[in-house]
Amino acid sequence: MANQEKRIVSLTRLEKFLVRFAINKRPPFWRQFLAWNSKRQMAHEEPTSSLRYDFQIPDPSRPIPEGERGLVGPSGHLIPFVPQELLPKDVIGRQVDEVTPYVGTYGMGGPGFFGLKLGKEWLVFAIWGAGDWIWVNDIFVEDPYLEKYERPEPWLHDGTDTLSSKLVGTEISSIEIHRHSMAMSFSNGMSLAIDEAPESRPIFEGNKRYREFLEDDDLRKAVFLAPTTELWI
């Protein structure tokens, strides 16, 4: 038992070192490593909500100099951010300028929220590991175990991004959000969706359970506009 506990402590220290190294040194694919680490941790937890609703963001009027932030500190003094309800008129007709699966942070890593930049704002899907929940034209945004289950290659895979070229420059044509599902369409005919059925999503490899919404989850509160991708949870 003592040897097992030592191995666990050692592994925990190693993981912490690797996370700090990724954040501080930013080697190739450091963002992918942080997202993978977050998903791996989630895979071993008991069922909890994958949605987030309340955050903190850096106050742009009170920035923190880089030398005073430490390895994983925020870029400014944090203030509360509670997203407003998203209405279709808030995003329909707006152009997509950037796509990222790396929205959000908890200091030592990131939750892997999905984001579309719309001018000076970001349309955020605040779901842990959101790429594994979201279909674009019936293909997952992310799917790390596609080979094991013989699924099509996702839009973001092994450092390759084939999604941005399809969405950047398009306009949002429609959006419909329900408690446990949503659908969007773009001016070039592309579509983005989150299905309600958990069987439509990849399982967590750690516990072999489907990613599923809990009874109290509400996507209408977890899809919103934000002024930054630096959402602290």
Image (cartoon, grey):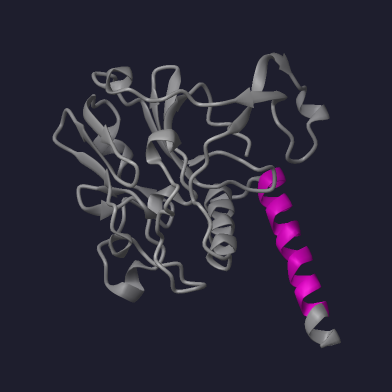
User: Is the magenta region chiefly helix, strand or loop?
Assistant: helix
- Relative placement, left or right, of 211 versus 92 is right
* Residue 227 in picture, x, y percent from top left: 51, 21
State the extent of the magenta-drawn residues as a range.
6-25
Q: Is residue 149 magenta?
A: no
Q: Nearer the viewer, residue 46 or 174?
A: 46
- Relative placement, left or right, of 201 versus 72 is left
Placement of the N terminus among the 4 image quadrants:
bottom right
Kindly indicate the quadrant of the structure image that contains residue 193: top left
Kindly indicate the quadrant of the structure image that contains residue 170: top left
Whether residue 124 is visible to the viewer of this picture, yes or no, is no
Placement of the C terminus among the 4 image quadrants:
top right
Does 71 sit above or below residue 13? above
x 41%, y 60%: residue: 211
Looking at the image, the residue that sits furthest to the left is 189
* Residue 64 in picture, x, y percent from top left: 76, 22
x 48%, y 45%: residue: 51
Q: Is residue 13 magenta?
A: yes
Looking at the image, the residue that sits furthest to the front is 215
Does 175 sit above or below residue 129? above
Q: Nearer the viewer, residue 67 or 62?
A: 62
* Residue 80 in picture, x, y percent from top left: 64, 25
Kindly indicate the quadrant of the structure image that contains residue 117: top left
* Residue 98 in picture, x, y percent from top left: 38, 30
Whether residue 74 is visible to the viewer of this picture, yes or no, is yes
- Relative placement, left or right, of 74 versus 198 is right
Q: Nearer the viewer, residue 57 or 221?
A: 221
x 43%, y 34%: residue: 221
Looking at the image, the residue that sits furthest to the right is 2
Does 2 sit above or below residue 226? below
